[in-house]
Amino acid sequence: MTATWIEAWAPADGAARVRDAFEARFGAAPDGVWSAPGRVNVIGEHTDYNGGLCLPIALPHRTYVALRRRRATDGQDDVIRLASAQEASAGVVTVRLSDVAPGTVPGWAAYAAGVAWALRQAGHPVGGFDAVVDSCVPYGAGLSSSAALECAVAVALDEVHDLGLAAHDSGRAALADMCIRAENEIAGAPTGGMDQSASLRCTAGHALLLDVRDGSTRHIPFDLAAHGLALLVVDTRAEHQLVDGQYAARRAMCEQAARALGVATLRDVADLPAALARLAGEFADQADVVARRVRHVVTEIARVEEVVRLLDADQVEQVGPVLTAAHVSLRDDYEVSCRELDLAVDSCLAAGALGGRMVGGGFGGSAVALVRSGDTGRVAAAVAAAFADAGLAAPAFVVATPAEAAGRTA
Ligand code: ADP
Ligand code: MG
């Protein structure tokens, strides 16, 4: 069974694509081309909205934006015109920045216009612009095409308006907050913040240890190849309709549990058995579910610490079983896996992967597995065969190596 690989574009090729498309569409040269990566999270799932830890890497797969600030000579300088190769049927979407508000921008343009809105909300003097988007980040695969789009627009607007935020990490953290607002409030999609932080704050060759409680980060060297290993991503291509409602329900239950425990977030649970005993008395018929949700979050944060400890100690192979433990927790305690994700993980393990787990919100999207470098092709072929045997659509594969954050590309 041959596997389908999702190749990342060379940055110069991505830049040329959007620059050419921009000139054809708007009849002028853009001010520049910027790009931002998708991400895959090594470990720490459903922890970001609990003030916890996560450990994403930026993918070499990026979203490219050619952008031109509108000048006074363009007439209405408050106008935003947007086109995306991934949303060709939408053509050019035109909105006035002053009209952007929650619920006013339909479709994909909300992610881009929302960033300009959030910059304005934060007091930055942002005006209208024209932009063309193209991307090799797979859509809706849990690899964060949405954050890649937002963050590419954010660094573009930062530069054309001389804001200087992208020049330093604290400015990038501020841009990430604005991208989160764009996605939550204008696109209306719930997101906890890991994706935007990864896309703006990762560095090449490193995983980003992000502490969501205080926004602090540490760059952890993540050179799997030097250890004869690779991180294989399986895009299951599965999409279940449950995603948003289930995400909101998990989030709400975590907040309820934190309130019942008298802590700001589940990050602050120091004694898990004591917390579970206390919750059992508070939630009557839902006690078992609440306990399992809390146990996932608290043990998952501990697994992030364990993986960081193993990476720091160069015991990289031992990361595998921790990933598998995370999958079991996401599947059985948090209940956000699905048939395709379980099959992806199980067939990776059966083919010799050292460990693996579902990534992202769940109910579809992608899984990751830690495999020996020489095994990536064989493991991918085995997963593809298992999907074919099960009558499922063919999955697609990426070997994830940590790339750099959002920035100017051309
Ligand atoms: P993901 O896991 O890929 O982030 P999401 O559902 O969060 O999945 O985001 C996907 C949505 O983001 C798309 O439906 C679209 O609205 C928007 N989007 C992402 N990338 C692009 C792009 N290149 N062009 C236009 N819209 C995009
Ligand atoms: Mg997303």
Image (cartoon, rainbow, N blue to C red):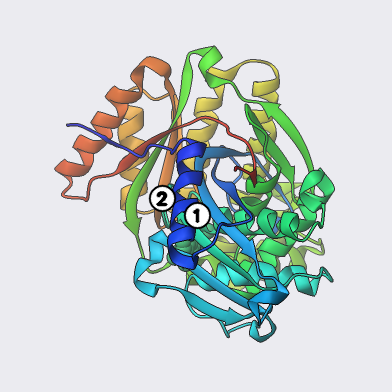
Percent coordinates x, y for residue 354 in the rendering: 44, 23
Query: Which residue shows up at 49% across the image and 59% down it?
Result: 22
Residue 213 visible? The answer is no
Disc 2 beta carbon < 8 A from ligand 1?
yes
The circle on residue 145 is: 1
Callout 1: SS: helix
- In primary-sequence order, the first of circles 1 and 2 is 2
Asked if residue 386 is positioned above or below residue 46 in the image, the reply reads above
Asked if residue 292 is positioned above or below residue 182 in the image, the reply reads above
Q: Nearer the viewer, residue 372 or 126?
A: 126
Percent coordinates x, y for residue 267 in the rendering: 75, 51
Tell me: 243 left or right of 386. Answer: right
Residue 58 visible? The answer is yes
Neighbours of disc 2 within 10 Å: few (<14), some (14-19), many (20+): many
Asked if residue 169 is positioned above or below residue 83 in the image, the reply reads above
Say which quarter of the image contains residue 78.
Answer: bottom right
Labelled pair 1, 2 in contact (Cβ < 8 Å): yes
Residue tagged 2: 138
Disc 1 beta carbon < 8 A from ligand 1?
yes
Question: How many numbered marks are there?
Answer: 2
Percent coordinates x, y for residue 202 in the rendering: 67, 39
User: What amino acid is at disc 2?
Assistant: Pro
Quarter of the image containing the C terminus?
A: top right
Measure the C-alpha gap from mark 1 to mark 2: 7 Å
Percent coordinates x, y for residue 284 in the rendering: 61, 72
Q: Nearer the viewer, residue 26 or 87?
A: 26
Query: Which residue shows up at 70% across the image and 28% down it?
Result: 220
Asked if residue 113 is positioned above or below residue 346 in the image, the reply reads below
User: What amino acid is at disc 1?
Assistant: Ser
